[in-house]
Amino acid sequence: MIHNKEVIPEQPAPKGTIGPIAWLRGNLFNGPINSLFTLLGLYVLYLLVVPTIQWAFIDADWVGDSREDCSRVGACWVFVNARFSQFIYGLYPSEEYWRANIVFAMFASIIAWLVIPRLPLKRWVIVFALLAFPVIAYVLLHGGYFDLPRVSTHRWGGLMLTLLLASVGMIGALPIGIVLALGRRSQMPIVRTFCVIFIEFWRGVPLITILFMASVMLPLFLPTELSVDRLIRALIGLTLFQSAYMAEVIRGGLQAIPKGQDEAAAALGMTYWKRMGLIIMPQALKMMIPGIVNTFISLFKDTTLVMIIGLFDLLGIVQAALSDSRWLGFSLEGYVFAAFVFWIFCFSMSRYSQYLERRLNTGHKQ
Amino acid sequence: MTQAATNASDLMVEMHNVNKWFGDFHVLRDIYLEVKRGERIVVCGPSGSGKSTLIRCINHLEEHQKGDITVGGVALTQDVKRIEQIRRSVGMVFQHFNLFPHLSVLENCCIAPMWVQKKPRKEAEALAMKYLERVRIAEQADKYPGQLSGGQQQRVAIARSLCMHPEVMLFDEPTSALDPEMIKEVLDVMVELAEEGMTMICVTHEMGFAKTVADRVIFMDQGQIIEENAPEPFFNNPQSERTQLFLSQILGH
């Protein structure tokens, strides 16, 4: 029996099943209880959002030099304004800000170049960013070369220090994490045992403890002439700590790649490193983007812990400014500002990772 | 049995008293198999009989614990360099294709010639296109594996192997994961390959294929080679009871 001799032509969807009104009806008002909750939700939102906007924008004071310029009805952004350069540069001498600015500008250009897909020569920018940029940044920030006055690292601070800690931590933790993850999956028992012990040690100890050890304990064991800069010690501690987490994220990604991929690559005569570098890692890293970015974001926020060893990152310097007797009582503004800056960076990372996931997705899992 | 005195250089694959265990489980028992250059072997048997393991030992995807394997005159040892040397001369096609999903069809075919044989990109791409044309899929070269049907993917996998100019091809149930209507397109390619004189060892249940191209059919059960014969007597006059039972099960419906 033949049901339909002719092809049935495409017909439009029935009225009231598509469009914004249908969406509202289907999702927010699809029953008396749901409608009630929707209205209740809108009311709570109204109670929260309106006073916040009132406080942060409408009643806020923006310009001035001292606390007398603030009405105290709304937020006193004058405080943040007055301390802004400290929040950015820490205790870096103000006549040398231009050096930090050059580093900031280079950093921003590198990021922009790598993030915008149309720009060419990505490979060379990465080489520059990994090899030349750290040297240039160090020479500029630290000085002592080319008639640049020395600025010792304990005067570095603010957002500058936060970005430095975060970038070094991220760039260091990823490759170390990859090596540790591969090592943990290795057939060689000594390599595997070493990696397991390393990972479990660093994961099992709180970051605060590591930073304390690095800044207080280590100098006790090392002879004074071997003393390493406190910032460097914090960087090493932070990087190794995060690389242990990174290793576990990467190991998870590696486990998700079917065994057949490695076998097919092996059957073509590829060596272990070619199999990993050409076949396994590109697939695994793609899957691991959410996990890696998650680790990056938590690393970014963990940098605030360096406060306890006397380094003044963004949050540290904000907190220090709060105890200034001329500006007592503005902690809310200070913390909101710090939170906002952290949020901007973390949210950007998060958005970029989602974009990257979509762009790299060849969409076709086997 | 064709164990008669053959010239050693004529032998592509030699397996002498090969034994393998998975833990306590004895998967391969005293395997004795010699494959001459240009010979086409079909290996069949019930699931779990060790036939996949047998061919996976030839390129050391599985390690055997006892006995000797020689491929193209090179003895297979633990030495990584030697294993890689053997793998370069042995092509393999898998049941689940195992194409690299992050690479396009063309890149799938180019990657080993470029990175293992150090061919320049242009040359590798020309080579890839030649073999993709041979398996009649050149027009899909820029697609990703996930955009192709199973049969197309398997043909790409065959082309990818051929790009390395292997001296012997191993097929590990190449049609078992395919929808029925796609089996023929893959078998056609394999038949052409056989007609061109490629040395082939195929684990397959496609008895039609075995009848058309095989020089010898090997029947395995419980890790042993039970029976070995030319296709015509193998199918028409199986000697052992287990072979008869197996053949009646797969042909008798």
Image (tube, grey):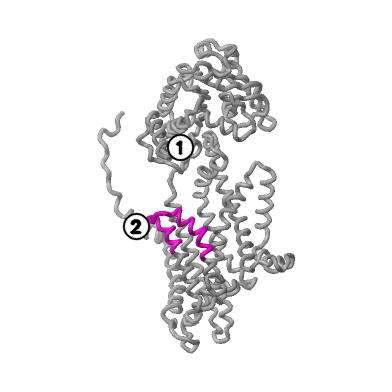
- Expressed as whole percent of the image width and height from the top left, the position of residue A313 reads 57, 71
Crowding near the residue tagged with mark 1, few <14, some 14–19, many ≥20 C-alpha atoms within 10 Å: some
Q: Is label 2 in a helix, a strand or a loop?
A: helix
**Which mark is in front, 2 or 1?**
1
Is A119 magenta? The answer is: yes
Magenta part, dominant SS: helix
| Mark 2 Cα-neighbour bin, 10 Å: few <14, some 14–19, many ≥20 | some
Disc 2 + disc 1, Cβ < 8 Å: no
Q: Nearer the viewer, residue A7 or B27?
A: B27
Q: Which residue is mark 1?
A: B119
- Disc number placed over residue A192 in the picture, else none: none
Identify which residue is drawn at 50% across, 46% down: A283
Q: Is residue A200 left or right of residue B209?
A: right
Image side of residue A191 versus residue B120, left or right = right
Residue A116 position in % (x across, y down):
40, 58
What residue would you read off at disc 2?
Answer: A22
Q: Are marks 2 and 1 on the same chain?
A: no
Query: Which quarter of the figure has residue B188?
Result: top left
B14 falls in the magenta region = no
Q: Is residue A75 visible from the viewing direction of this image? A: no
Instruction: Name the foreground residue: B13 vs A202.
Output: B13
User: What chain does badge 2 belong to?
Assistant: A
A6 with respect to B113 (left or right): left
The stretch in magenta equals A109-136
